[in-house]
Amino acid sequence: DVKVTQSSRYLVKRTGEKVFLECVQDMDHENMFWYRQDPGLGLRLIYFSYDVKMKEKGDIPEGYSVSREKKERFSLILESASTNQTSMYLCASSLTPVRGDGYTFGSGTRLTVV
Amino acid sequence: SQQGEEDPQALSIQEGENATMNCSYKTSINNLQWYRQNSGRGLVHLILIRSNEREKHSGRLRVTLDTSKKSSSLLITASRAADTASYFCATDGKGGSYIPTFGRGTSLIVHP
């Protein structure tokens, strides 16, 4: 069964800490995405990557960076965590063009910044 | 740059009834997808419909697409309590972009 695995389900960090959220997929997908999900706002795209070492800003990249050193791994980095980054973070991957099974999501990481 | 918007925002029905959710979008698309999200979990892909298709079925799910109205609907027939979840539509981006954009979702509650 194909999978996208996010390293943590729940994470609590302090303001100012550097935070790494890891995402690994085992489907040899070219594209990987990071979204955050907040009540009433739906899913908002932070960053995406269409190839190793390639990255593109999404709609809300401020305060975040990403790293894709290997095809299967896409990391989201909060350089200096702030309380307004408390959210659910979702990683997804897909082929190009998208096939009938759509985008595959991880289970999410609920991050709380205190 | 949200593309799809679901309607209604919330839906509450009894087990056995049908549930219909709608999605409207603004610009031309290559495909549209529907996802389900159980509380606190990731999204699960339900069905993909391409722009040259008008209707697709998968089990108790029926999806329609009207490109002239830029809208889609998801029908869940004979709903069950386990169908309680949020449902999202996702469109591929404008101009053939592969980046999925999601609406805010419809929250469905099915009462046993």
Image: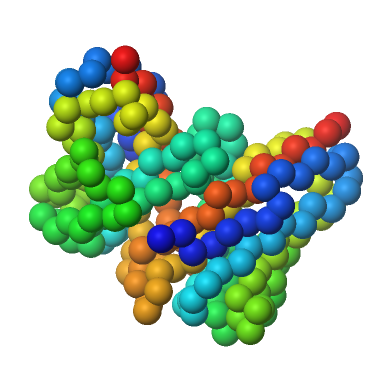
Foreground residue among B9 and A53:
B9
Q: How is the image coloured?
A: rainbow
Is B108 above or below relative to A112? below
**Residue at 54 percent of width and 41 percent of height:** A40
Q: Is residue A105 left or right of residue B32?
A: left
Q: Nearer the viewer, residue A8 or A79?
A: A79
> Would residue B83 be seen by someone viewing this image from the given angle?
no
Q: Quick one: A22 or A89, which is closer to the camera? A: A89
Counting from the top left corner in percent of width and height, residue B36 is at: 59, 47
**Observer able to see residue B105:** yes
Left or right: residue B23 versus residue A21 is right
For the C terminus of chain B, give its image quadrant: top right
Location of residue B6 with respect to A63 vertically, above or below: below
Residue shown at 17% from the left, 43% from the top? A65
What residue is shown at x 61% (from left), y 67% (from top)? Answer: B24
| Quarter of the rendering containing residue B62 | bottom right
**Quadrant of the rendered image containing residue B49:** bottom right
Residue A113 location, quadrant = top left
Q: Position of residue A82 (x, y in %)?
A: 26, 25
**Nearer to us in this view, A87 or A67:** A87
Residue A33 image offset from top left, x and y in percent: 31, 51
In the image, B7: left or right of A35?
right
- In this rendering, the count of numbered labels is 0
Q: Residue at x 23, y 26 (%)?
A: A81
Q: Quadrant of the N terminus of chain B?
A: bottom left
Image location (x, y in percent) of residue A92: 37, 49
Is A40 above or below relative to A8? below
